[in-house]
């Protein structure tokens, strides 16, 4: 089982958009926890998060027919930008449903990567429900914020 998982990781299409980021030793945290702690600097990615990896890998696996229908997701954060950037690189239309309270800066960042932002829902659960309905009603591919 572990061999299969490692193989999937090593074969994932992510480095077309993601940078290979460094590990950085955290001396204060290491002292406090009594161990050697290294941090993976995913904040150095183009969208400042590891979320880009899963989004792009998901887009790269879509069939041509699925690409034509576009993708949809819900997010109030970095997943939105990861999906927008990944979809843009692959030429796939992307709709990102964001809750009403999401910051203007997150909306603008998502749009800057080519995503269409739809503001709907008082919370992320309502936004996810809207994204799932769009996927079902329009034949779009749902890109889950936690599972992809």
Image: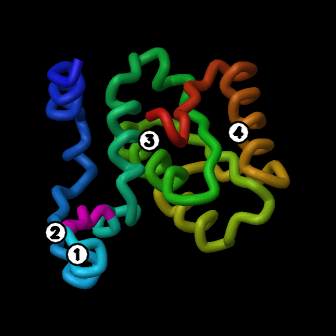
Report the front residue among 33 and 99: 33
Magenta stretch, residue numbers: 37-42
Residue at numbered disc 4? 128
Could you tell which of marks 3 and 4 lies nearer the N-terminus?
A: 3
**Residue 69's x, y, as percent?**
56, 24
Of marks 3 and 1, the one in the foreground: 1
Display colour scheme? rainbow
Q: How crowded is mark 4: few (under 14 residues within 10 Å), some or many (20 or more)?
A: many
Confirm or deny contact between disc 3 and disc 1 (CB under 8 A): no
> Outermost residue, front direction?
34
Report the front residue among 85 and 34: 34
Helix, strand, or loop for circle 2? loop
Q: Which residue is at a point 54% across and 42% down the rendered structure image? A: 145
Quarter of the picture containing the N terminus is top left
Helix, strand, or loop for circle 4? helix
Confirm or deny contact between disc 4 and disc 2 (CB under 8 A): no
Seen in the image, is 28 located left or right of residue 102?
left
Residue at numbered disc 1? 30
Could you tell which of marks 2 and 3 lies nearer the N-terminus?
A: 2
**Residue 99's x, y, as percent?**
75, 55
Residue at numbered disc 2? 36
Helix, strand, or loop for circle 1? helix
What whole-number distance in Å separates the C-alpha atoms at marks 2 and 3?
38 Å
Q: Residue 87 carries which label?
A: 3
């Amino acid at each position: 089982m572990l061999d299969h998982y490692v193989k999937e990781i090593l074969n994932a299409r992510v480095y077309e958009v993601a940078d290979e980021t460094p590990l950085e030793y955290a001396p204060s945290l290491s002292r406090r926890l009594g161990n050697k702690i290294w941090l993976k600097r995913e904040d150095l990615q183009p969208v400042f998060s590891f979320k880009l990896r899963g989004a792009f890998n998901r887009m790269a696996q879509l069939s041509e027919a699925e690409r034509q229908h576009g993708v949809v997701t819900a997010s109030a954060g970095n997943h939105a930008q990861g999906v927008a950037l990944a979809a843009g690189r692959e030429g796939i239309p992307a709709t990102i449903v964001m809750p009403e309270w999401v910051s203007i800066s997150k909306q603008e960042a998502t749009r800057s990567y080519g995503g269409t932002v739809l503001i709907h829902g008082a919370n992320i659960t309502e936004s996810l429900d809207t994204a799932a309905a769009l996927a079902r009603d329009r034949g779009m591919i749902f890109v889950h914020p936690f599972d992809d």
